[in-house]
């Protein structure tokens, strides 16, 4: 399948870079690969990728610093590559706005599915400069208005708040299921097409980020509520 997307692999292990480049190239991706931060910046200047596959354990400037750089400056999908025991790094990376993570050693088929999932969410967004949908379509979520058509979240002052693809997908799932308790497993299946695993905090981290954006009092959420032992529930305003 040609034209699947542009992937940038950032990993200091040449064997892994070559393995991923060959596998994804065979599946129609345009792949660039580099070993660290300096090369990554050069690669982005040359051609902006759709998804960056970012190893967090890099010599010199580490992957978390590079993830922050990418999220602040580039509209790209970010998938972190971590050691299986790097729970803290995964948590910090998700807090920085990464879209997903995969642990080493990884299965290339799973990695391909993760990349395609992030790509689908990225491609579902309207192109930059596209006209905004009518304001009447916006939905109140706490102190903000969410425009599903434009995939845009604005506060009451009219300022747009940045959303990752995963954060928007979570809000969209909540909009489709008002006043219904959704488990972590249900949220993961509907947003990332995979089941929740024990100690997987990715949903909790995304919910915490969303609460800081939409709740009047993030420490006492009233819009996205926790249902102890069950999951989360979106309670519409008014």
Image: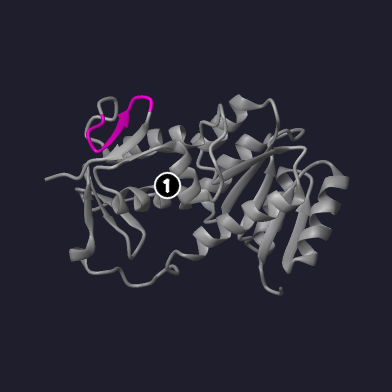
Residue 72, percent across and down? 50, 46
Q: Quadrant of the N terminus?
A: bottom right
At label 1, counting other C-alpha atoms closer than 10 Å, the crowd grade (few under 14, some 14-19, many 20 or more) is some
Q: Quadrant of the C terminus?
A: top left
- Please tell me in which quadrant of the rendered image residue 90 appears: top right
17 lies above or below 226: below
Residue at x 57% of width, y 48% of height: 70
Instruction: Tell whether position 195 is magenta.
Output: no
Left or right of residue 97: residue 237: left
- Give the SS element for disc 1: helix
Residue at x 52% of width, y 47% of height: 71
The residue nearer to you, when weighing 13 against 187, is 187
Residue 178, percent across and down? 25, 47
Left or right of residue 180: residue 116: right
Residue at x 68% of width, y 49% of height: 53
Left or right of residue 63: residue 201: left
Residue at x 75% of width, y 66% of height: 27
Magenta-colored span: 221-229
Left or right of residue 216: residue 39: right
Residue 55, percent across and down? 71, 40
- Please tell me in which quadrant of the rendered image residue 81 appears: top right
| Farthest residue, direction bottom | 2
Residue corresponding to mark 1: 167
| Farthest residue, direction right | 15
Residue 48, percent across and down? 62, 62
Count every numbered label the image shows and give the total. Answer: 1
């Amino acid at each position: 399948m040609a034209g699947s997307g542009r992937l940038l692999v950032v990993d200091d292990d040449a064997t892994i870079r070559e393995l991923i480049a060959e596998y994804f190239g065979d599946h129609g991706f345009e792949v660039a690969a580099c070993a660290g931060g300096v090369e990554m910046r050069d690669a982005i200047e040359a051609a902006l990728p759709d998804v960056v596959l970012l190893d967090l354990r890099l010599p010199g400037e580490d992957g978390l610093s590079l993830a922050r750089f990418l999220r602040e400056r580039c509209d790209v999908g970010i998938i972190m590559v971590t050691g299986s025991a790097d729970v803290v790094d995964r948590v910090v990376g998700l807090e920085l706005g990464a879209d997903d993570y995969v642990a080493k050693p990884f299965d290339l088929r799973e990695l391909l599915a993760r990349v395609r999932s992030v790509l689908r969410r990225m491609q579902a967004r309207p192109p930059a400069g596209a006209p905004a949908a009518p304001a009447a379509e916006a939905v109140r979520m706490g102190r903000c208005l969410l425009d599903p058509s434009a995939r845009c979240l604005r506060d009451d002052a009219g300022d747009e708040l940045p959303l990752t693809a995963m954060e928007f997908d979570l809000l969209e799932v909540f909009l489709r299921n008002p006043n219904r308790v959704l488990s972590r497993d249900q949220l993961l299946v509907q947003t990332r097409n995979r089941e929740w695993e024990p100690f997987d905090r990715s949903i909790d981290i995304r919910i915490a980020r969303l609460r800081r954006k939409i709740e009047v009092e993030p420490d006492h959420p009233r819009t996205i509520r926790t249902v102890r032992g069950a999951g989360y529930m979106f309670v519409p305003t008014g």
